[in-house]
Image: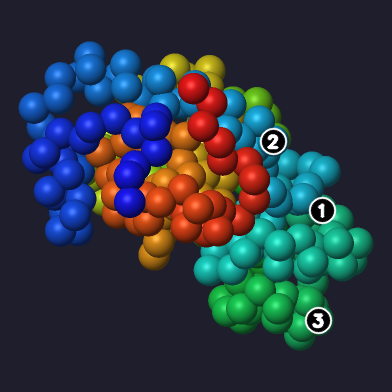
Amino acid sequence: MSSPAYARPVPPRARRAAARGGSPFDPQETPLARTRRARRMARELALIHPDAHCELDFTTAFELLVATVLSAQTTDKTVNRVTPTLFAKYPDARALAGADRTELEEILKPTGFFRAKANSVLGLAQALLERFDGEVPGRMEDLVTLPGVGRKTANVVLGNAFDVPGLTVDTHFGRLVRRFGWTAEEDPVKVEAEVAELIPKRDWTMFSHRVIFHGRRVCHAKKAACGACGLARWCPSYGIGPTDPEVATKLVKTPAASDTE
């Protein structure tokens, strides 16, 4: 089948690597060229996903922090079903730190790994009380000292509760920026550092939401909707999924992806 009109020819080296499951990262692409391509793709993502946002429901930094910890190995929708009950019963760090473990585990059971997650949020609440007077700190260096909080969780909280720009390198984000050929790194901290060199800091938080939206809706892990992807023109991984527009469109989970050229 012919490829969409907006799809550009992919460099043979990157195309061959992507086809055999290797990295589409092209070491011969200059840093300037990679930066320009990344920023063009970022602008396109803003057009494709104007509705991108944090999909965890929250009203306070504490709620977002706990919800993000609970989102590990489950969906945001599942967490959003659980947190109204959780926060009605335990609205702040002091209340959560004093929670009855059995009751807490029962509330968290739908999220999976509920015993481990109960341990995590109890330890988190106790640490907030002991070190930060029950308040969520607004600095990366403080957040990552809390139990169960790494850079990914910290960046979610900083970007969405404190308006401090941050890149959220979750599974979707890492998968997509590697497919984009922006990095060959697997380690989330190294991925974050390399992408931070490509995208303006002021855009980090919203850019993260847009990449995650794209990963959930269009650029799926097992079968990317390449033929319905507005990034195809600049993506060296074009062709790892169906390129026929009609076939690819059926894979898109929402109508958000579009050719905006």
The amino acid beneath tag 3 is Glu
Crowding at dot 3, Cα within 10 Å, few <14 / some 14-19 / many 20+, comes out as few
Rounded to the nearest whole Å, what is the CA distance between mark 2 and mark 1? Answer: 30 Å
Identify which residue, 98 or 226, lies in the foreground: 226
Q: In this rendering, would 1 be left or right of 138?
A: left
Rounded to the nearest whole Å, what is the CA distance between mark 2 and mark 3? Answer: 36 Å
Crowding at dot 2, Cα within 10 Å, few <14 / some 14-19 / many 20+, comes out as few
Disc 2 vs disc 1: which is toward the camera? 2
Find out whether the residues at labels 2 and 1 contact each other: C-beta distance under 8 Å.
no
1 or 3: tag closer to the N-terminus: 1
Q: Is residue 254 visible?
A: yes
Give the image location of residue 209, x and y in percent.
57, 39
Identify which residue, 16 or 83, lies in the foreground: 16
Give the image location of residue 113, x and y in percent.
58, 79
What mark, if any, has residue 186 been given in the picture? none
Tell me the quarter of the picture where residue 70 sits: bottom right
Q: In this rendering, would 239 be left or right of 227?
A: left
| SS for dot 1 | loop
Crowding at dot 1, Cα within 10 Å, few <14 / some 14-19 / many 20+, comes out as some
The amino acid beneath tag 2 is Asp
Tag 2 residue? 51
Residue placed at 29% from the left, 54% from the top? 240
Tag 1 residue? 92
| SS for dot 3 | helix
Give the image location of residue 219, x and y in percent.
44, 50
Q: Is residue 17 above or below residue 138?
A: below
Find out whether the residues at labels 1 and 3 contact each other: C-beta distance under 8 Å.
no
